[in-house]
Amino acid sequence: MLNKAILVGRLTKDPELKSTGGGVSVLNFTVAITRKYKDANGERQSDFVNCVAFRQTAEFISNYFKKGNMISIDGTIQTRTWDDGEGKRHYVTEVLVNDAGFIESKREMESGGAAKKAADSEELPEMPAEFDAGAVDDDLPF
């Protein structure tokens, strides 16, 4: 079996490093990943993926990344559940980060240069007009 997640996206807010009761560094953050194609209105949609990093990886992200910076993530997908004080069950799916890395140069990260260039770029293809993301093929074997 294989559980591998590789993401490239932008941090949605400045990382806030916290510690567990045992003193382990932990960082919960969200990465925004823009989809490849534009929708019917000519806009690109984004997915927001929750991530969690521990120890040195959490400290690395906290020290070198801020809101809007592009980041690469290598990790695994995990799900967990818990019951709150009222007995209501909560579910969360997130990426457990094993490794993180830079995508932009230090200059681009500080000036927002790569972000502006990506926003202005029209290199990505348009979604074909006949494409229906909601279409379901009942003949699929899964």
Image: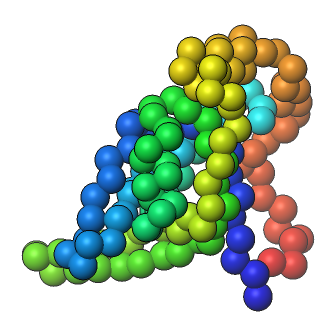
| Nearest the eye: 130 or 60 | 60
Looking at the rendering, which quadrant does residue 126 occupy?
top right
| Residue in view at x 62 percent, y 43 percent | 71
- Decide if residue 85 is on the left or right side of residue 13: left
How many labels were placed on the picture? Answer: 0
Counting from the top left corner in percent of width and height, residue 68 is at 51, 29
Q: How is the image coloured?
A: rainbow
| Nearest the eye: 72 or 139 | 72
Counting from the top left corner in percent of width and height, residue 78 is at 53, 75
Looking at the rendering, which quadrant does residue 104 occupy?
top right
| Residue in view at x 88 percent, y 26 percent | 125
| Residue in view at x 43 percent, y 55 percent | 59
**Looking at the figure, which quarter contains the N terminus?**
bottom right
- Look at the picture and state if 112 lies above or below 133: above
- Decide if residue 110 is on the left or right side of residue 43: left
- Look at the picture and state if 80 lies above or below 52: below
Give the residue at the far bottom of this rendering.
Answer: 1
| Nearest the eye: 66 or 133 | 66
Q: Is residue 62 visible?
A: yes
| Residue in view at x 78 percent, y 15 percent | 121
**Looking at the figure, which quarter contains the C terminus?**
bottom right
Counting from the top left corner in percent of width and height, residue 13 is at 40, 36
Counting from the top left corner in percent of width and height, residue 109 is at 58, 26
- Decide if residue 125 is on the left or right side of residue 29: right
- Look at the picture and state if 17 lies above or below 5: above
Give the residue at the far left of this rendering.
Answer: 86
Q: Is residue 41 visible?
A: no
